[in-house]
Image (tube, rainbow, N blue to C red):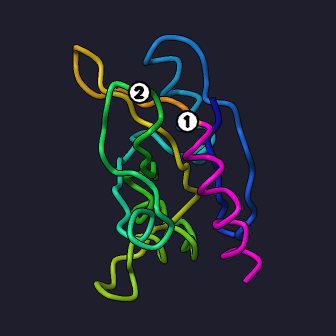
Amino acid sequence: MKMIKITTQNEIFVLDFPEGNRSEQNKILRNHIGPECEYLEHVMARRLYGVLGASNRVTSAPGECVSMLIDEEGLLHKLPVNPTGSYLYMTDIHGCPIVGNILIIGEVYTGDGIDFCGMSDDQFNRLYPKLKKILEG
């Protein structure tokens, strides 16, 4: 299953969601966000749903719900603003920017709660072209 990385320079990459246990996955996710990332922050960016048409409803179908991961301490690390992440998060409305690289990932409801995963093919095929268009914009 896939995830999407968008850098602060508006570069877009398609990555495979990491395998392994939760700890191993989180380490790889943090590394993709940035070398200083110690804590992941889970963000439900409103334009990801309202403008791009992604699903924000977590189900037992892996990756049908998508969300954004960022560096929770990005502002403390003085990371550069991520224009695309900030747009998706509606920074133009409330003024709180998204900084550093972002990951667009999937979510799945398991019997133990909600876990991160790759996006379903449907969500990926819906979002990737729209994100590329925004970046080329």
Whether label 2 touches label 1, CB < 8 Å:
yes
Side of 27 relative to 72 (left or right): right
Hey, what amino acid is under mark 2? Ala
Tell me which numbered mark, 2 or 1, is placed earlier along the sequence.
2
CA distance for labels 2 and 1 = 8 Å
Q: Which mark is residue 1?
A: none
Residue 131 is situated, as x and y percent measured from the top left of the image, at 64, 66
The residue that mark 1 highlights is 120
For badge 1, the amino acid type reads Ser
Mark 2: few/some/many CA within 10 Å (<14, 14-19, 20+): few
Badge 1: residue crowd in 10 Å (few <14, some 14–19, many ≥20):
many
Q: Tag 2's secondary structure? A: loop
- Picture coordinates of residue 80, whole percent (x, y): 57, 71
Q: Which residues are magenta?
A: 121-137
Depicted 116 relative to depicted 3: above or below:
above
Task: Find residue 16 and report its horizontal and vertical position in percent.
Answer: 69, 31
Residue at point 36%, 48% (across, down): 41
**Magenta segment includes 70:** no
Q: Quadrant of the N terminus?
A: top right
